[in-house]
Amino acid sequence: MKKFLVILILAVLGFHLFAAFSGLGFGVTRFEKGVKDFYLEKTVSELHVANTVTSIVVNFRGFDTLGEVTVLFLAVSAMGGILYKRRHHAGDRSVLFSSSSIVRSGSKLLFPAIILLGVYIFIHGHLSPGGGFQGGAIIATGFLLMLIAYENFSVSHNTLSYIESFAGIFFVVIGLLGFMNGGTFLQNFLPAGILNNLFSGGVIGIIYVMVGFKVAAELTGLIYTILHEKD
Amino acid sequence: MNTIILIFIIFLGGAILTFLAGMLKGILKEVLFLASVFVPVVLFFTNISIGQTFSFQAAGFAFQWGITPLSYVFALIVAGLGLMAAIYAVSAMRNKDNVSFFYFNYILTIMSMLGILFSRDLISFFIFWEIMTWSSYLMVVYQGKDVQTVGIKYFIFSAVGAYAMLMAIVVIYSLTGSMMIDSLIQSFPGFSFNMQLLIPILLLIGFGVKSALMPLHVWAPGAYSHAPMAYSSVFSGALSKMGIYGMVIVMVSLISHIPGGHWFREVIAWLGGITAVMGTLWAIKQDDAKKLLAYSSIGQLGYIIVGVGIGTPLAMMSGLFLAVMHALFKGTLFMVVGAIERQTGTSNLTEVTGLIRKMPWTFLAALFAIIALAGIPPLGGFISKWMLYESLIGSNHYLLVIVIFFSSTAAFLYCYKFLFGFFLGQEETEWSHVKEAPAMMVVPMLILAVSTFVLGVFPGLILNPINEAMQTLGYANTQGHLWELSIIFNEWGNQIAMQPIVYTIIGIFLFFLTFLTIKGYKETRYVTTKDISSSGEVPKEHENLTFSMNFMQPFFRAVEPLMRRQIDKYYTGFANGMEALFDFTRRIYTGNGQTYAMYVVIFVVLLLLFKNIIFG
Amino acid sequence: MDDKLFEILEFGVYGASILLILIGLYAVLTKRSLIKIVIGMSIIDGGIHLLLITIGYLKGGTAPIFSPGYEEAAGQMVDPVPQALVLTAIVIGFGVTAVALSLIIRLYRHHHTLEIDEIKRLKW
Amino acid sequence: MVGSPVLLIAIPLLAAFVIPLIGMIWKELVRIIPGLVLAYMLILSATLLYYVSQNGIIVETIAGWQPPWGINLVFSPLTGFLATLMSALGFLVWLFSYRFKRNVDFEPAKKYFIFLMLLIAGAIGIVITGDIFNQFVFIEITGISAYALTAFYTGRNSAEASFKYLMMGALASSFLLVAIAILYSQLGTLNMADIASKMHTMNPTYKIIALIFFITGIGIEAEIFPLNGWAPDAYTEAPGPVGAAFAGIVVKAGVYAIIRMIFTLFDIPSAYDFLIVIGLITLIVAETSALRQEKLKRMLAYSSIGQMGLVIVAFGIGTHEGVFAALFLMLNHAVIKPLLFFSGSSLVFNSKEKQIAEMNGLGKRMPLMAAFFSLGAFAIVGLPPFAGFWSKLSVLSAAANEGLLLIIVLILIVSVIEIVYYFRVVNRIFFQEYSREKSAAPHRPRVNALVAMFVLAIAILVIGFYPDAVTGILHNASKDLLNTDEYINNVLQLGQSLTR
C-alpha cells in the first residue's frame, strides 16, 4: 500500500521533472551570453590554464572550493566526533581481513604506482583532466589497499591531521596573500606563465596540490577511522 | 523634569529598588515600598493639573501622556485606594515569603493603572494595560494555590481581552494613521459601518474581561480570592475599574456615533444586569468570604455596567459614582477579610464566628462597608443605587429595573451572611485567642469606611469631579444644578434639606444600635453551637452546625434553575477539547525519518501539481 | 551523429538521470534499512550530478581543455561550469554520506538494529 | 576600513584548520581561539555595518573577477544586519558554552568549538554571498556542522535526531541542485544579481519549477511546515547552547535565503501570498504542537518554528512595514530564544530526561535562572514592556494596513496558545513545590554563562524600553531588501568601491 503510494507520487514527480528537462533541450545553446564564454576566453588569455574546469574550480569559483574543502574537513571531523569513544585503543581493528599472499605482494607492488599516479594527477590538474580531488582520492585508494592487505599497517593519525591542517591553512593563506597583494581574496598574484607548461596558471597549480594533499589525508583518515570502529 | 515622567520614573525605580532591597534584612524594603507609592501619589495630587500633557516619539509612534477630567475621577480611586492598601499591605504581608516580590508587583500595578489613565494614545494605553495584566497575574499566583487552573484561566482571559483590544488598535491605526485616542474619537463617525461595529466590539471584549462582564467573568472569583487580600482590595476596587474606564470612553465617544446604535447600549446594559443578578446569586451561595466578596464584586460591577450602558446623564453619573463607592467599600471588605484571615487563619464563614468583641474596629469598618454595599442610607451606596433606579425608570427600562431590584434585594442576603457569619453569633472557644488586627491594618480600613460615610452624606465631593468629567464626555453641563438631576435631591429637597434627613436617619440608627446592644447584653445566655438538642437531634462531633451552613436553603431552591447552567463548564470543555485536538495535531511528527522525507516529497509534488494555481 | 540517434540520446540521458533520482527517492522513502536509505541518497546524488552534466552538454562539443594549437576552440567546447559544479557537489555528497554512515554506526551501537521504524524514540 | 567582508568567512575557516594544530600545544587554546575569532567577526561586521550605513553597499569580489563572472559577497544594510546579529549571537553562544560541560573529553570539546565556529561562519556565508551555488556550499557547511553538533552527546538519542536531520538535509541539497540546474540552464549564470536582472527573459514555467525546488530545498533549513520534521528532534537532542544557535542563527539564514529568492531573484508576485499561507500553517501547527510537550527543549523548538512561521508571514505581507516587522521579529527572536535556551538548559542541567515536570519549584533554588527564563517567556509572548511586544505590534499593524484581518485574528489566537504553554512552565518554576525526588537538582551556572545571559536580558530590556535603538537599522535593512533594482545595479557595477 505504502509502496504503491510512493510509486504514484514518484511517478508524478518524475513526469514533471521529465517534462521540464526534456523541454530544456539537449546539446543546444540556450542562453545568449553566459558566464561560460567568459571563462573559456579568460582561462586561456589571462590565467594561461589549459583545463577550464580547473580554472573555474580553483580560480573563478575558488571560493566554492574553499567551502568544499571545509565540508570535507568538517565531514572527517564530524565522523571522528560522532564515533568518539572514551576508551579508544589505537591499532585495534574492528574488521580483520585475511588476505592472501598474492594480494599482499600485489599491493606492495601497486602502492607506489598508485601514489605516483595520484601525485601526477593533482600536479597536472591545470593541464589535463583531473586535479586535487581526483588525485587525492586515488592516493587514498592506495592507502585503502594497504590497509586491506596488511592487518598491522597503520598510519599515524597525527601526521594525517598535520597534513590536513597545513594544507587547509596554506589554502586560506594563499587566498589572504592574494587579498593583500591584489586586493581580492584568492586573487592570482603569481605570474601566469605559459599555457600548457607545468608552471603556469599562477596559484592555481599550488592550490590544487594543496587540495590534493588535503583530500588524500582526509580520505585516508576517514577510512582509518571507520576501520578502527568497534562495538 | 516633567512631573508626569517623574511620577513614572519614581514608580519604576521604586519597584526595582524595593525588589532589590528584599535581599537585605530589616525594614528598608517596607520603607522604600511606602515611599515609592506615597511620593508619586502626593506628586500626582499636588503637581498634576488636568490638561497638562507630555509627548514623545518612540518606535515610529507618537506618545502622549496627560490627564483628563474623566481619568482624574478614576485616578482618585487608584491613588486613594492604592495608598491605603499599601499601608495595609505592609502590615498584612509581614513575615510572608518573597514580600519584596509582592511589593514589586504592587507598585507596578499602581503605576500601570495610573499609566492607563494618563495615556492619551492607544499604544501606551495598551502597554500599561498589559503591564497591569501580568503584574496582577503574578499576584494571583503569588500564594501558589491552584496556579495552573486559576492563574492560567485569569491570564488566558486577560490575554484574549488584551489581544482583542490590540486588534482593534491596529485596525484603528490602519484606518486613521494615528494612535491618539482623540483622533480616533474624531474620525470614528467617518468609518464604514462594519468598522464602526468591529472596533467597539473588540474594545468592549478587552474592557469586559477586566470588568468581569457576564460571559467573560469566569476568571474573577478565583483570581480575586487567590490573590493576597491586601492586593485583592486594589484588584477588585481599582483594577476592575480600568475596564469601566475604557467602557465609558467606548460607550460615550464611539457607540453613540454608530447610526442606530442604541440597541448596542441595550445589549451592554442587559449583560450588566445579568451579571449583577448572577454575581449576587453566586455570592449568596459561597461559604468562603473571599469567594463571596469576589462574586459580589462581579455583581456590583454589573450595576456599574448597567449605568454606563444606559448612558443617560443620570445613569452615567450613577455608574461613575457607584464605581467610586465600590472601590471604597469593596476595598474595605477585602481588607477586613484579610485581617480576619491573618488573625484566625481561615476565611470560611462557617468556621469563624463571634469576632465582634475580639476585633471591634474591624467590625466597625465591615459594618460601614456592608451598609454601603447593601445600599442603605445614609451611606454612599444608597445614593448611587437610587440614581440608578431613577435613571432606568426615566429611560423606560422597566424590566431592567426589576432585574436590578431583585439582585439588589438578594444582595442583602449575602451582606447579612457576611456580617453575621464573622462577627455575630456565638463565641467559640476555638477563637478565644483572637486579637484585634494591628493598627496599620485597621487604620486604612477605618479611613476607607469613614469615607464611604462622608461621601454618602456629602456626595458633592465626588459628584463635582464626575460632573466635570461628564462635560468633557459631551454631556450637558449641569451648571451647578447638579443636585437637580435626581429626585432624591430636588423633590425631597435641596442640599440643605437633604442633610437634616440624613442626620435624622443616623440618629435613629444610632439609637437603635445602642438600644439593641444594651438590651442584648442584659439578656445574653451563653450556650455552645452544639446546643440544639431542643430540635430532637443529637449532632455528631464532626458535624459543622454553625448557622451559616446551608444558610439560604429555601431561597436556593427557588432560584436553582437560574444557577444550574454554569458558563465556566463550557469554557473548560472547550479548552479541554482544544487541548485534545492539539495533542492530536502534534502526531504529525511521527518520529519516523522516512515519514518526514515523505512529507517533503509530497510537498514538492503538490506544489508541482498545483503550480499554476499557486504561482500562476 | 545523426539526428535520430541524438533524439534517442536526449531522452535516454534525461530519462536515465531522472530515473536515477526516482529510484533513489524510492529507496529513501520505502526501504527500512538505514544503509539502504543512505545508498538511496547516494543514488539521488548520482542522478542529479548526471542531470547537471547533461545540461552543460553541447552537440558535438569537446572537453573544455585547451590543447596546444587549439587555443581558439572555445566555441566547440561543452559548458565547463556544470562540470565544476558537479565536482563540488560530488565532494559535498561524499562528505554527507560519510557523516551519515558514521551516524548509522552510532545508531547501531545504541539500538542494535538498522530498521528505521524501530528508531523513533523522539516523536510528537 | 578595518577589513572586508571576505574576512568574515576566511578567518573562521583559517582558524578551523589551525585549531587542531594548536590544540597539540596548549589545550585551552582550543576553547579560547573560537571565542576570539567570533569576537573579531562581531567587531568586523559591526564596523562594516556602520560603514555601509554611511557609504552604501559593499560588494566584495573574489579572485579578482567582476560580479557576473566571479563569486562576490554583498554586505548591504540587510545582510550586514543579519551578519552582525549572527556573529553577536555566535559570540554569546560561545561564551555560554565555554566549559559548558566540564566532564567532556578534550577531543569532543575541540570539535565542538570548531563546529560551532563553522556553523556560524556558514550561516554568515549564506547571508552575505551573492552567488546561488556558493550559497548552496555554505548551506552544506552549516548543515554538516549542525549534524555533528546535534550528535554531540553520545549518551542520548542524539544520533537519531542527527540522522533525521541529515536525511532531510540531503534531500534539501538534492532539490537545491535541481533548482540551480534549471536556473543555470536557462540563464547561463549563477550570480544572484545577474539572475535577477535576466529573470524576466526566462520561460515562466521553468521559473515556477525552479522556485518550487528552491522553496523546498531551503524550506527544509527554514523549518517551513511540512518540511520541518527534523527540527524538534534536533533542538531537543542538541546541547542547550547549540539549540540556541539553531534557533538564533541557522534558521535565520534559511529564512534569509528564501526571502532573497522571492524578493530579489524571482519576479513572481503570487509567491508572497504563498509565503503568507505557508507561514500561517507553520505557525499554527507548530504552536499547537508545542502546547502539550513534556520536554522543555522540544517545547522551545516548536515555539521557535512557530516564530519563524510568523516571520515568514510578515515577509509575505511584502510591504515596507511587513519586512520591517519581519526583521524586527527576527532580531527579537534571536535575542529572546537563546536566553530561553540558555536559562532553560541551566534549569534542567542536572536532569536526565529534561522534562518540564522536573522544573517544579526551581524558582526558589535557582532564582536568577528562573528570572531569566521568565523574562524570556514574557518577552517572547509579546508582553510589554519587553522586546517581543514591539515586533508583534509591528507585524499586526503591517497586516492591518493591508487589510488582512483574518491573519491578525489567527496570529492573536496562536499567541494565546503560546501564552498558555509558556506560562504553564513559568508557573511550575515559581509557584509549585520543589520535591527532592521529582525536581531536577539545582545547578550553579558559571560566570561566563551568567554574563552571556545578562547581555541577552539587557538587550531584551533595552529593546523593550527604547525600541528606537534598533528601528533605524531595521528600516535601512528593509529598504535594502525591497529595492531590487538598486541591489542589481550595486552588484553589477561593484557598488561602493573598497578603499583600502
Image (cartoon, coloured by chain):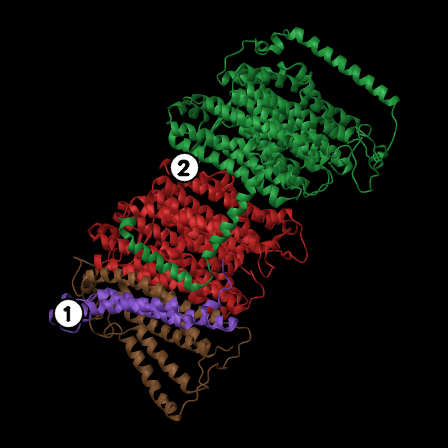
For residue B96, side relative to residue C9 (left or right): right
Position in image of residue D30 (x %, y %)? 50, 65
Label 1 secondary element: helix
Q: Quadrant of residue D60?
A: bottom left
Residue at point 55% right, 36% down?
B131
Q: In the figure, what tint was chain B given?
A: green
Q: Residue furthest left?
A: C2
Position in image of residue B435 (x %, y %)? 81, 33
Q: Are marks 2 and 1 in contact (CB under 8 Å)?
A: no
User: Can the viewer see residue A191?
Assistant: no
Query: How many numbered circles does the render carry?
Result: 2
Q: Callout 2: residue from which chain? A: D
For residue B521, side relative to residue A13 (left or right): right
Residue C6: assigned label: 1
Residue at point 70% right, 12% down?
B502
Q: Nearer the viewer, residue C38 or A193?
A: C38
Residue type beneath disc 1 = Phe
Residue at point 46% right, 86% down?
A152
Q: Which chain is brown?
A: A
Report crowding for label 2: few under 14, some 14 to 19, many 20 or more residues within 10 A (C-alpha): many
Q: Callout 1: residue from which chain? A: C
Position in image of residue A147 (x %, y %)? 41, 83
Q: Which chain is purple?
A: C
Q: In the figure, what tint was chain D given?
A: red
Q: Please check whether the numbered discs 2 and 1 fall on a single chain.
A: no
Q: Say above or below: D346 vs B573.
A: below
Residue D397: assigned label: 2
